[in-house]
Image: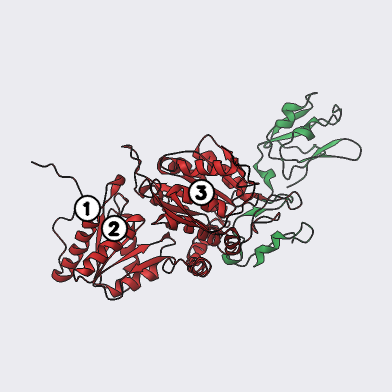
Chain colours: A green, B red
Amino acid sequence: MVWRAICKKKEERPKLQSYRNWDELSPIPISFPMDGSIGITGDWRTFRPIINEKECNNCGMCWLYCPEGVIQKNNNGSFEIDYRYCKGCGICAKECPTKNIEMKRESENHHDEPNKIDI
Amino acid sequence: MSQTKSTYDQSRETIILKGNEAAAYAAKSARVQVISAYPITPQTTVVEKLSEFVDSGLMPGTQYIRAESEHSVMAIIVGASIAGTRTFTATSGQGLFYMHEMVHWAAGTRLPIVTAIASRGTAPPWNIWADYSDVMSQRDTGWMISFASSHQEIYDEILMAYKVCEDYDILLPNFVAYGGFVLSHTSKPVIIEDQTAVDAYLPSLPDEKGWPHIFIDPERPMMHGNLIMPNDFYAEFRLKIHDAMIKAKEKIKHATKEFEKSFNRRYGNGLIEEYRTSDADVALLSYGELALQAEHAVDELREEGYKVGSIKLRYFRPFPVEEIIKIAKKVKVLGVFDRATAFGSPTGGPLSSEVKTALYNSEVKTLILPIVGGLGGREVSVKQQKEQLKILMKIKETGDFPKSLIHGTLWDGLLEVKK
């Protein structure tokens, strides 16, 4: 059976499984760790967190608190938000000790924001 | 007090046991690894016995987890089963209803959990005596539902249930139901099988890899219970449960055959057990302890010259459609006795409604008499069952149903005020 491939070691397991019909499906819905198994969830966002990079002291609290793990640390020590998967919950802005993350309504355009990623 | 013995070793012996203790012994023989339970009458002594086994070292390595409610019990069992263990619990009536949400989680996660149900009446009004309405109410949860009719069958049925559930093509949980007090609290000799023989009969315990479809392993992380959008595979996963349930029929027959080979006890074809039906004109179909008692009624009527038979339903889910059709082809009138209610259903009894459905497309012209009785533990005597069979004979002769039917069903043994 196709679904038994999931029993294999992490390395041997197929990255993605494909099914032709219901019979080939695994008995239950499961997902493996991968980027956005349910799709580009960034489009659920109403408010966009924007880091004020000039004032940010790179303490990493936002990275620590982000429930979705979409804040990444760059090589230069700064932090960047992956807007493809950020749902805009606002926890990073709430937790930022220097209050340098601003939540902006998505309808307001962010042409000048340097860390915007088109989704 | 506690014995110091610390081993699973059990040689074949016959012990006088209560039905609930037979269930506990079955869990021990099956080497279940995690038990969680909350006491409720009449199931309590199952978990009392199991806690005694665990405490006295007779089930080394088995985790006994106390919980604050039946809902938590099934949540614990679901978690333990996901981790790749053989699990067991037991409950009754209101406890089962409180467990209901997690009952769906067990089936939806396709976990091979076996749960003993000492069936009792549904409150209100409070009732703690034999009545299968509790387990019947779990009909559409995706659990297999089977009935035991004797103390020995409780022990045997739980072992067979593990064999069916843990088959990789099935992976569904199973309720093993038996009548509260009439079986749970009465004593009979029960053969407890040799541990090596049970080990050989059952599939081996899940190893550290767990079940094939779900596991907890840091090397192979996975998420389950995911949200599925309407256009994704939700319907397909529902279909897979139904498909596994239908496939389980063959597995049940196989497990029963294997059981007979290993332990020399026979339970029909697994799904149903027929008694003197080969030349019978009429037959009574029932389940649980009253189905076994009906065999005595059949014997007595046979001596009087009546050609009657009885059939014991062992599995309600999956439902043995083919077997029911075969029986209906043999007999002219079939009485279907329910010790349970299905309010507002075509017949008022869950099994009789199912039997009528099963026969609809079969071209069988057998007359079906739905009977409801024994509710809330009310006694159904052999004499009463003989009367039921005689009513069936009369229907066979006249072709007419008795006038005493209420909404098309014979409500047997209703009280009448004596003047």
Relative placement, left or right, of A7 versus B17 is right
Chain letter of disc 2?
Answer: B
Q: Quadrant of the N terminus of chain B?
A: top right
Q: Position of residue B182 (x, y in %)?
A: 35, 48
Q: Which quadrant, please, contains the C terminus of chain B?
A: top left
Residue at image x 18%, y 45%? B415
Q: Which of B28/A5 is in front?
A: B28
The answer to whether B349 appears left or right of A118 in the picture is left
Q: Kindly tell me whether residue B244 is visible in this rendering.
A: yes
- Label 2's element? strand
Q: Nearer the viewer, residue A32 or B152?
A: B152
Residue at 25% over, 62% down: B297
Whichever of labels 2 and 1 marks the residue nearer the N terminus, that label is 2
Residue placed under numbered mark 2 in the picture = B337
Q: Nearer the viewer, residue B118 or B350?
A: B118
- What amino acid type should be assigned to the residue bearing mark 1? Asp
Q: Pointer 1 indicates a residue of which chain?
A: B
Percent from the top left, x then y, of residue A95?
74, 27
Secondary structure under badge 3? Answer: helix
Residue identified by numbered label 3:
B24
Q: Measure the alpha-carbon separation of dots 2 and 1.
A: 9 Å
Residue type at the position of mark 2 = Phe
Mark 2 vs 3, N-terminal side:
3
